[in-house]
Image: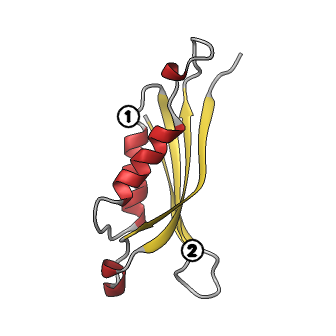
Amino acid sequence: MVESRTLLVKGLELECLIGVHQHERSSVQRVLVDVELEVKPIQHGDDLNCVVSYEDVVAVVHRLADDGHIQLVETLAERVAACCLNFDGAVSVSVTILKPDVLPGAAALGVRVQQTR
């Protein structure tokens, strides 16, 4: 018997206006987003209508990233997490957002936010 399921979106690449520095307010930056959404197990077999769709999760991330300038990566991660917890059956979520092109010598900088319903 399955106790829980985790929906995974890994390495979703977006461009958005994010950051506190002046140049980050007018030029889009590349960000990488991972979402791990724990959901209650489905009770109705192989029915797409009974699960959270990957496409819906990706659409939420795109909508929030396209919603104008955001100062903090933490803010975007918290907004994504809160929206994901609104899906039916959502139990908990972990959202990681990385900015890969920020500091020379660092592969990426970012944050992970975890929320539980």
- The residue shown at (47%, 42%) is 57
- Report the residue at 38% width, 34% height from top: 86
Q: Determine which of the numbered discs, if any, sits on residue 21 in the image.
A: none
Q: Residue furthest left?
A: 68
Q: Position of residue 109 (x, y in %)?
A: 55, 73
In the rendered image, residue 89, in percent from the top left (x then y), is placed at 47, 25
Q: Earlier in the sequence, mark 2 or mark 1?
A: 1
Placement of the N terminus among the 4 image quadrants: top right
Q: Residues within 10 Å of mark 2 (few under 14, many from 20)?
A: some
Q: Which residue appears at 38% of the width and 44% of the height? A: 82
Residue 44 against residue 25 in the figure, above or below:
above
44 vs 83: above or below? above
| Numbered disc 2: secondary structure | loop
Q: Is label 1 in a helix, a strand or a loop?
A: loop
- Asked whether, in this view, residue 93 is left or right of residue 61, the answer is right
Q: Is residue 16 left or right of residue 105?
A: left
Q: Which residue is labeled 1 in the image?
A: 86
Tell me if residue 14 comes above or below residue 61 in the rendering: below
Nearer-the-camera pick, 28 or 102? 28
- Looking at the picture, the colour scheme in use is secondary structure
The residue indicated by pointer 2 is 100
Residue 65 appears at what percent x and percent y?
Answer: 38, 59
Q: Quadrant of the C terminus?
A: top left
